[in-house]
Structures are given as structure tokens and as C-alpha cells.
Amino acid sequence: MTMVDKSILTNRIELSNDPEFGLCVELSCWDHLDYIEDVLAEHFDVEYDFKVDDPDNSRYALFFGEQTDEIVLRKSISEINRYHACTDQIFVTV
């Protein structure tokens, strides 16, 4: 199980559209990136295309390729945000 600082629960996840790479989720830190990567895969069966893990520039992001269903991704992000807000708990991940 991933150990995550519960303070990330206050960080709403937003889906954006990067002009160069498409659908993107920017995250607050490496722990947030690792946690959301696991939650999307394990709970929602959503895989990203590539990630940016750049501590020098404080950039942590997941990018989703054309194979990703945007509607499914948006619903998954909405469900993660709702779960965090309603329960004040993190998802259990392996």
C-alpha cells in the first residue's frame, strides 16, 4: 500500500489540455504524482502515456495520449476529487 501524506487531499485534480501533448494532469509534488498515477491505474483502469517528474522545476504531470477516452478520464478525476472531499480519505493502493 502506498503511504501518502493526507495533505494532498486538499489539492483538487484538474484536467487541462497541453498545446503540445494533449490531455494533462498537473500535480503538486512527487508523492501526489505517484499516488494519482496508482489510483488512476488501480481503481479506474486509466493509464497515462508519459509523465514529467522534474523536481528542479517543480513540475509533476501525467500526460494522456490519443488512446485515452477523455470522458472516462474526466469521470475518473471527478470521482477522485469527490471521494477526497466527501471522505477526507485517500484511496487504498497496492
Image (cartoon, rainbow, N blue to C red):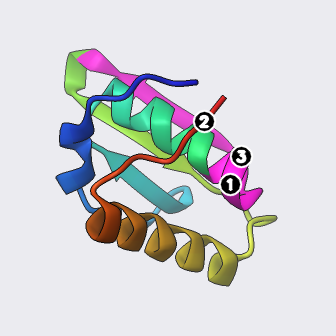
Q: Do the residues labelled 3 and 2 touch (CB within 8 Å)?
A: yes
Badge 3 element:
helix
Q: Give the range drawn in magenta.
A: 40-55
Residue type at mark 3?
A: Glu
Disc 2 residue type (three-letter): Thr
First in residue order: circle 3 vs circle 2: 3
Q: Do the residues labelled 1 and 3 touch (CB within 8 Å)?
A: yes
Q: Is residue 41 above or below residue 23?
A: above
What residue is at 45 percent from the left and 76 percent from the top? 78
Q: Distance between the residues labelled 2 and 1?
A: 8 Å
Which mark is on residue 93?
2
Seen in the image, is 48 located left or right of residue 28? right
Residue 58's place in the image compared with 73, above or below, is above
Q: Mark 1 points at which residue?
A: 43
Residue at mark 3: 42
The residue at the far top in this view is: 56
Q: Name the secondary structure under disc 1.
A: helix
Q: Residue 44, how many percent across, how many down? A: 70, 60
Indicate the quadrant containing the C terminus: top left, top right, bottom left or bottom right: top right
